[in-house]
Image: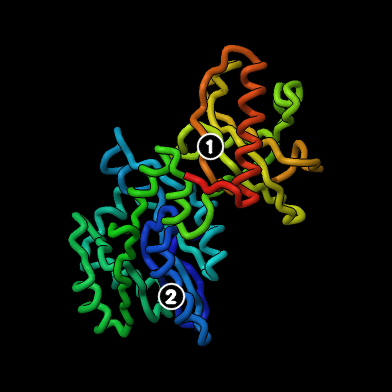
Amino acid sequence: MESFEGLELGSKGLHLAIGMFDGVHLGHQAVIEAAVRSAQSGGVSGVLTFWPHPSRLFNPDKPSPQIMVPEVKNRVLRGLGVQLVIEERFDREFAETEAEDFLPQLKKALPTLESIYIGDNYRFGKGRKGDLALLVSQAKELGIGVYSAPRIKRNGRDISSTRIRKKLGEGNIEGVNALLGYPYFSLGVVESGMGRGSKLGFPTLNLAWSPELRPAYGVYAVEVIAESSAKVSQGVANYGVRPTFSDQENPLLEIHLFGETDLSRGNAIKVLWKNFLRAEKRFSDSEALKTQVSEDKTQAMAIFSGKKGGR
C-alpha cells in the first residue's frame, strides 16, 4: 500500500477509481472496472482508497466496523485487474482538506492522472462539501476526465456496504454473497487446536480469525482453497466461541472437511462461506454435539450436491 504523496508512476496515464470500497461489492466493481477498462489502451489502472474508515475519526465511540481489512481489500482489487492500489491515511489533517483543494492536490501528486471514476453519491473534502458537480468543473480545467457510475440495485434497493454489514450480522451469508458478487471469504494460517473435533470423529482445521466485523456466530457450509496448490475442498465450519466446551472470549473459525486432506498446521488457506446452516448453541454434552455436527455435515453435503437450496 502506498500514500499518493511522492508516488512515482512514470509517464503512463493513470485511470483512478476513488472510494472507501469496503467489501468491494457489485456497486464498487462497476466503478473500478470502468477504470480498468480505460487503462487497457496503455494506461495504468488504480484505486485510491482510505484507512481507517472516517467514522474512526468522527465517531470514535461507535465506528463502523469494516467488512475488510486493507490487505484483503487489496487482494480483491488486484483480482479485478487493478494495477495500483493507493491507500491514503484518513487522519485529522486529511479530513481538513477543503473540497476545492482535493482534486488540484491529487493532480499535483499524480501528474499523469488522466481520469477519475466515482460513484454518483461520492462526497469528499472538509464537511463532505465536495460532490460530482465540483469535480467536473475542476477536472475540465485540469484536463482530467470524470466518470460516475450509477448505483446498482438488488431487490429494489441500493447495494451498499451498510446493507452487507447488516446481513453478515444476521448470518445471511447467501444475501451477502449476492451483493458482493463473489463468496465472502476468510484468510488465515491453520493453527493447532485442542483436538476435541478429532475425539468426536470430526477433525477440524482451526483459524484464529477475527475481523473487525464479525459474522453471526454459527455453522456454515464452506469451501476451502489451499493457497499453495489451489486445491478446493468442501466442508462445514463453525464460527464462534464454542459454548459447549469453553465459551471463550475470542471467536474461532473451525472447519471440518469432507474426506481426507493433507492440510495441517502452518498451511495458508482461503475459506469461502457459502450457506448458513444454523446458529451456534450450547449442547448438553459431547454426544449431543456429535449428533448435531453429523446432521450439519449431511445438510452441507446435500447443499453442495444440489439437493437442497440455501437460505
User: Pointer 1: what residue?
Assistant: 277
Q: Within 10 Å of the Cα at label 1, are there few (<14), some (14-19), or many (20+) other Cα atoms? A: many
Q: Position of residue 243 (x, y in %)?
A: 54, 19
Q: Is residue 301 above or below residue 197?
A: below
Kind of element beneath mark 2:
helix
Q: Which mark is residue 35?
A: 2
Q: Position of residue 109 (x, y in %)?
A: 39, 70
Mark 2: give few (<14), some (14-19) or many (20+) Cα within 10 Å. Answer: many
In the rendered view, does 211 fall on the left or right side of 300?
left
| Quarter of the image where one finds residue 96 | bottom left
Residue extending furthest toward the bottom: 41
Amino acid carrying mark 1 in the image: Leu
Image position of 232 with respect to 109: above or below:
above
Tell me the CA gap for discs 2 and 1: 38 Å
- Say which element carries label 1: strand
Q: Is residue 44 left or right of residue 108?
A: right
Q: Residue at x 28, y 59 (%)?
A: 156
Residue furthest toward the top? 284
Q: Measuring 29% from the left and 48% from the top, which residue is drawn there? A: 92
In the foreground, 209 or 232: 232
Describe residue 298's horizontal placement relative to residue 220 as left or right.
right
Name which residue lies at 30% across and 70% down: 150
Q: Are marks 2 and 1 in contact (CB under 8 Å)?
A: no
Residue at left offset 40%, top offset 69%: 30
